[in-house]
Image: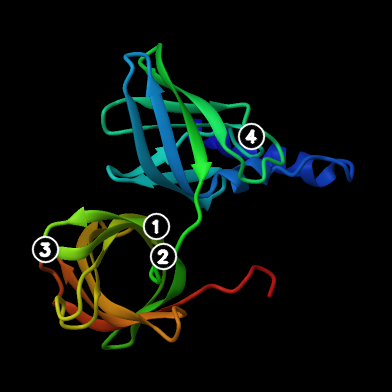
Amino acid sequence: MYRSTRLATLAVGLVAALAGPAEAKDAWNQTADILGYKQLQASFTDGSVSYRRLEFIYLGAADLQVFGADGARSVETQGLGTDFFAWSDATGLRYEVSGYPYDNHHAPVAGLVRKGESVVGKFRLVSLKGLVPEVAGRWSGVMAFSGGREYVTSLNVSRLARRFAGCTHGEHSARVDVAGHGYQDAGVLHCEKGFFTDGPYAIQTLFFDDAHDRSWFLSLRGSVDFGGTVFQGFVDATDLSGESETLLGKFYLTRPPAFGE
């Protein structure tokens, strides 16, 4: 019921935006501004302060995720054209930005920190620039297995990497999409040369084929090549029900072209 109501709200907002006068506000304005690499600077009523780095990534429709040291978390919005964003961290603190400025041009943005119904602090989001890891961003392509099986696949990888024991470059949060089967949250390990046999990157995730009530374990290993434009390597898919043999294949992903090109 909630999802249907939200989709109806988005549809009405989109029609209104398309049908409105030329001076109508861009419904994407504030959402586009919050996306990317940020530093969160929080000060609390007990006198303590904290600093952390976050990345906001767009998933589609009005859905966003925020990636940080405690993994990926959903961002609450109020639909298309929202100026409200809220998310929680692993400790249960809730961060809210209300009245996000229009035409902000990535200037700092202020918000409140809540614990339950109580305001326990304030924070600022400051946009950061820096070197983007070669694996970060969006990828699209295929996973192909022996026997002619081929699956359209896309990948969305965060810039931020968390520490991972034994792996020098850490783990990037990611989302794996297989066409027709929904998505799965995952992580991309980036380790030193020689740590893995098929390249410095590895993705291991459980994949649920809900259309057929079967679970698979996916393992991808590979490298980013040709100036950061190709992510390729080997993939194994193990049927956890034991009904099928392990599928052995390769994956080949590239940067998606601009929409309309």
Counting residues from the N terminus, which is met first, the one under dot 3 or under dot 4?
4
Mark nearer the viewer, 1 or 4: 1
How far across and down, in percent of the image, does residue 249 sit? 26, 83
Distance of label 1 from label 2 (alpha carbons): 5 Å
Q: Are marks 1 and 3 in contact (CB under 8 Å)?
A: no
How far across and down, in percent of the image, does residue 209 sit? 29, 60
Q: Residue at x 47, y 45 (%)?
A: 38
Q: Is residue 205 left or right of residue 175?
A: left
**Which of 90/216 is in front?**
90
Q: Secondary structure at mark 4?
A: helix
Label 1 sits on what residue type? Answer: Ser
Q: Is residue 200 left or right of residue 242?
A: right
Q: Residue at x 27, y 88 (%)?
A: 147
Q: Would you call the spot at circle 2 few (<14 residues within 10 Å), some (14-19), or many (20 or more)?
A: some
Tag 3 residue:
166
Distance of label 2 from label 3 (alpha carbons): 21 Å
Distance of label 3 from label 4 (alpha carbons): 47 Å
**Which of 154/31 is in front?**
31
Tag 2 residue:
136
Q: Secondary structure at mark 1?
A: strand
Counting residues from the N terminus, which is met first, the one under dot 1 or under dot 4?
4
**Which of 71/209 is in front?**
71
In the picture, the disc for residue 9 is 4
Q: Is residue 47 left or right of residue 16?
A: left
Q: Residue at x 14, y 76 (%)?
A: 195
Tag 1 residue:
158
Label 2 sits on what residue type? Answer: Ala
Q: Are marks 1 and 4 in contact (CB under 8 Å)?
A: no
Q: Would you call the spot at circle 4 few (<14 residues within 10 Å), some (14-19), or many (20 or more)?
A: some
How far across and down, in percent of the image, does residue 67 sit? 37, 47
Q: Are marks 1 and 2 in contact (CB under 8 Å)?
A: yes
